[in-house]
Image (cartoon, rainbow, N blue to C red):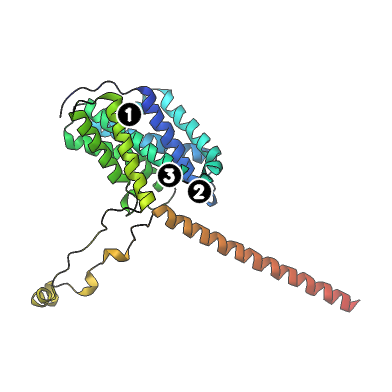
Amino acid sequence: MHGSLNAIPEWLDLGAIAVGAGAGTLVAGEFRSKRLDWLGIAILGVAVGLGGGVIRDVLIGIRPAAMSTDTYLLTALVAAIVGMLLQPALARAGMAIQILDAAALGFFCAVGTAKAVEFGLPLLPCLFIGTVTAAGGGVVRDLLLGMPVGVLYAGSFYAFAALAGSGAFMISYAFGLEGVGAMSVCAGVTAAVRMSSVWFGLSLPEQMSLRVPSRVRRRLGPRGGFSDADIVDASSLHTPRTKPIEVVRERIESEERERDARDRRATRGRRRMGDARREDGETAG
């Protein structure tokens, strides 16, 4: 597919970076036990806000737009600090963080797909670049925080939402909707599909293995056959509602509870030892 698209508004590109960087540090704020400092938050925000766009521009074969002016880096830095400061308030607002994360996904998908179309790439590369641009920032965030990469797991819908949004963009563009209109459709579809997995627990089918009939296994024999132990049932690995961030949060909370319990036991032990010394002193007196 070839064609020209009106130049992507700079405010939309900067808006995607701001929302992405802010959403990245909002998620990081849920893991305060990792003890990120202000520089760590700034690095995380820049990596999340600019990561998808840099990957996009490298795939297209141009100099990353983030390196062409100070505005992109400054926007990501400011958004990261603001996200850090607002995290406690937004965390109490229910689904606010998930909604902002979905909005960032939609913005990045729209800008990435539009730029691929603007450079005259064919249909499939446009879909691929839109998906990678949207999911790239989340992958960078998860890697930096030491979390399971959410895009790989059942229940996240990150990559599928971005792919659906890119497809909606291409369909809208094919029917004559250009510029901000097609990008708005893309962002809306992406965010809606992503939030559907949060609200309704939707998920793509999990990995599975083809089961070889027992009569075939008997014919193959021990040298070329499959035993039941070789067959992995995907349903035992995850559930449709499993989300990597929840797994990490549960592990961190469990470690914090164990640490608090050890501290309480140590405090009680010191208190008992103090009481015993006082009793010995009184007896000696």
Report how far apart the C-alphas of labels 3 and 2 lie in the structure.
Answer: 12 Å
Residue corresponding to mark 3:
98
Q: On the picture, is 150 further left or further right than 93?
A: left
Q: Amino acid at mark 3?
A: Gln
Residue corresponding to mark 1:
64
Across the whole image, how many numbered discs are drawn on residues?
Answer: 3
- Return the disc, 3 or 2, that comes first in the chain's sequence: 2
Report how far apart the C-alphas of labels 2 and 1 lie in the structure.
Answer: 31 Å
Q: Closer to the camera, 160 or 199?
A: 199
Q: For residue 106, which quarter of the picture?
A: top left
- Disc 1, SS: loop
- Return the disc, 2 or 1, that comes first in the chain's sequence: 2
Q: Quadrant of the C terminus?
A: bottom right
- Disc 3, SS: helix
Q: Amino acid at mark 1?
A: Pro
Crowd tier of the residue under label 3, counting other residues whose Cα lies within 10 Å: few below 14, some 14–19, many 20 or above: some
Q: Residue 230, position in %: x, y?
A: 22, 70
Q: Is residue 24 above or below residue 259?
A: above
- Return the disc, 1 or 3, that comes first in the chain's sequence: 1
Q: Looking at the image, which residue sits at the far left?
A: 219
Q: On the picture, is 249 further left or further right than 218?
A: right
Q: Is residue 151 visible?
A: yes
Residue corresponding to mark 2:
30
Report how far apart the C-alphas of labels 1 and 3 lie in the structure.
Answer: 28 Å
Q: Residue 105, position in %: x, y?
A: 35, 39
Q: Amino acid at mark 2?
A: Glu
Q: Residue 40, position in %: x, y?
A: 50, 41
Q: Closer to the camera, 48 or 213?
A: 213
- Disc 2, SS: loop
